[in-house]
Each structure stands twice: as structure tokens, then as C-alpha cells.
Amino acid sequence: MTAYTRSIRLYTQLRNPFSEKVARGLALKKLEFERVIVSDPEDIELLNPETALLPVLEIAGERRHESSAILEWIDGLYPQPALLSSDSKVAEAQRSLAAWSDSSFAFYWNRWRATQEPLDEARPAPESGPFARALSRVGRSFGLPSRNAANDLREAQVIEALARRLDDLVGLLGDRSFFHSETPSVADLGVLGMLLLMREGPIPGSRAMLEARPSLAAYLNRLEAATGGPSSAAA
């Protein structure tokens, strides 16, 4: 059965960087698929009873969840172009970067979302003093909206940490076209989903942070071109 006669469906929420990671992997392999938006928690649990999380990929009636596992599944079904190096050490480095990207950026994304909720009165307020004032200035420099000082500070801390993670990526990428390879791999697909969320998502100033690092912005453009062109939604 060819790649084009199998029925492929990607179940996702409207905004989900891990789904974008899978979608771009499918596009890289030139596989046609249907993107199905699911918002009802009960429907999500039916699709993925194990963790009740999306994305879920369905190929010819068989389903898999968890974005990294999905990519390795489709890489086995459709080996070209390969998403992992044939060199075992390079492949392990690619997997490691993908895992780092997933866990690191998801951590900061969830921390940022928490700053959009009222501060729990039972939680200690962020410290005051020169460090706190400096972080508040960082937040204002990225165009943070004016809110109460505690939430401003918490948001500024998240954004400052995200900036450091982008610097980590700049150093790791160096002058290469892609991470650990001259062609896109699982490492790049993991990074892509989160960079799209930063460029097009709601975190204040995150697009400016990305554009302030030209090598990373150029890398994102290069990766988009290799995986189906620009996206207007990190979903």
C-alpha cells in the first residue's frame, strides 16, 4: 500500500506545538493527511485513553500518541527521507535534543500560562528588591502589558528564561543548516513546533526575541521551507 492510499488523520487542538511537530514530519515525507481539530475533553479521552492528550495520529485505522513516538512510527512506515541519522551516536543526539526541546519549552509555556491566572494568595509573592525590579524592566522591554506587579514579575521571569533557551539553541546550531545534520531530523521538528509557537503565539515579546537572533530566525525559515512552507498557526 502506498503512502498516498492510506488514510492519515492528525487529531489536535487548535494550538498545539507537538501536533505541529508531527504535521511537519508528515509534510517532510510528503504524506497527505487530514487535520482534525478536537476540543471536547471526552472526545480526546476516547482518542487517547492512556494520557488523554493530543496529538493522536491515525493511519489506516491504527492510532498512536505522543509526538516523538509518532514520528518514529511514521519513520518506520515511510523511511524516506529519514528522520534519524543512520549513525547511532548522531541519532541519539537528535533524540536528546528533541526531548530537551519538548520538555524545556513545554515547561516555560505552562509557566507562562500560569501567569495569566490570578496569583494564588496562598502562594508566596515573588521577592522584591533590585533583582525583581530588573526583571520587571526586562518584561517591559518585551512589551508586557501593565498588570499587577506580582504577575508582571512572574511573566518577566518566564520570558527571561525563554531568551536564555533561545541562546542555547543559537550556540548549538552554530553555522550548520540543521541540528546534528545537514537535513531536517526529529531534533529540528521538535524545535520547530516551539519556535512557531514563540513566533506566532500569545507570549508577549517572544516574536521579537526570535527576530533578535538572526541565525535562529533564518534557521526557522529554512526549516519551514523544507517542511511545507510558512504556517500561520502553531497548531
Image (cartoon, grey):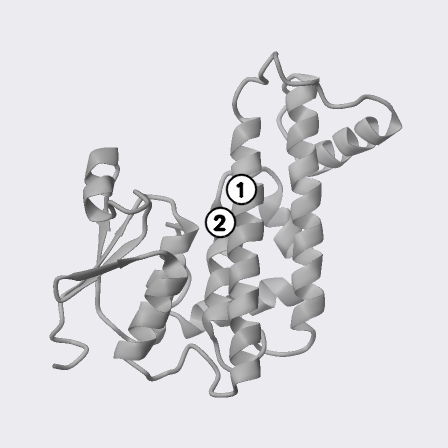
Which percent across, then down, holds residue 74?
30, 72
Which residue: 57% across, 59% down?
A: 100
Most foreground residue, 96 or 179: 96
Q: Kindly tell me whether residue 213 is visible in this rendering.
A: no
Which percent across, then down, holds residue 125?
70, 18
Most foreground residue, 168 or 65: 65
Q: Which mark is residue 221?
A: none
Which residue: 80% across, 27% down?
A: 132
| Helix, strand or loop for disc 2 | helix
CB contact under 8 Å: marks 2 and 1 = yes
Instruction: Give above or below for 88 relative to 193.
Output: below
Which residue: 39% across, 67% down?
A: 229
- Looking at the image, is mark 2 or mark 1 nearer the viewer? 1
Residue farthest along the top direction in this orientation:
121
Q: Which mark is residue 197?
A: 2
Instruction: Give above or below for 104 relative to 140.
Output: below
Kind of residue at badge 1:
Trp
Q: Kindly tell me whether residue 41 is visible in this rendering.
A: yes
Task: Count how many numbered circles sit on residues in the image.
Answer: 2
Q: State which tag comes first along the sequence, 2 or 1.
A: 1
Which percent across, then down, holds residue 107?
56, 44
Most foreground residue, 25 or 215: 25
Badge 2: few (under 14), some or many (20 or more) residues near its Cα, within 10 Å? many
Residue where numbered disc 1 is placed: 109
Quadrant containing the N terminus in the rendered view: bottom left
Q: Is residue 59 left or right of residue 83?
A: left
Q: Is residue 139 left or right of residue 183?
A: right
Kind of residue at badge 2:
Leu
